Image (spheres, rainbow, N blue to C red):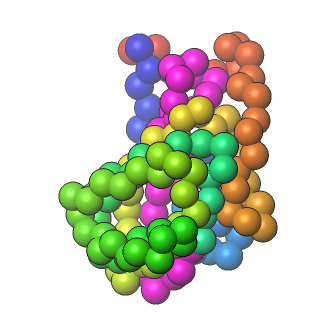
Amino acid sequence: MIVRTTEEITGTDREVADPSGNWVSKRIVLGGDRVGFSFHETTIKAGSVNEFHYANHIEAVWLVEGEGELLDRETGITYPLAAGTMYMMDKYDRHTVTAKTQLRMLCVFNPPVVGTEVHDENGIYPLVEVPPLEDAGRHRA
């Protein structure tokens, strides 16, 4: 069993901030946990516009707080975002998230990220090999 809190992740290498200050991602479950996905809590700053493209990962997002818009850059279709909205990048979709208010979302990635990835100039995470199990940082309950 793995048990973690966002409080214990805050301020560690599992808390990753966008260099521009637009978002913070708390990586609760990572590839080293060997469960086949990673799970993150991401907070996006109100008023920010953020371009993403996960060319190597499928991402599912559940918005739990805030309002904004999601632009599918392939089709030009814009979707409203509000608490209770789920969206999934099932075709490695290029997308833009505009935060009208602060957004807080829960995100699942497959394959899992390992925690060291940073977005490149196209908003893409590289595919990084999962570290050995002994580096998983498990807490037993």
| Residue 48, percent from left and from top | 51, 82
Image: 6 above or below 19: above
Decide which of 113, 16 is in the foreground and name it: 113
Decide which of 83, 75 is in the foreground and name it: 75
| Residue 75, percent from left and from top | 48, 71
- Furthest residue in direction left, as rendered: 84
| Residue 50, percent from left and from top | 56, 74
Report the residue at 37% width, 62% height from top: 104
Report the residue at 44% width, 32% height from top: 4
Residue 25: name its quadrant. Answer: bottom right
Q: Is residue 26 left or right of residue 55?
A: left
Residue 41 within the magenta-colored segment of the rendering: yes
> What segment is highlighted magenta in the picture?
25-50
Report the residue at 76% width, 28% height from top: 129
**Can residue 9 be seen by looking at this rendering?**
no
Residue 81 within the magenta-colored segment of the rendering: no
Image: 88 above or below 111: below
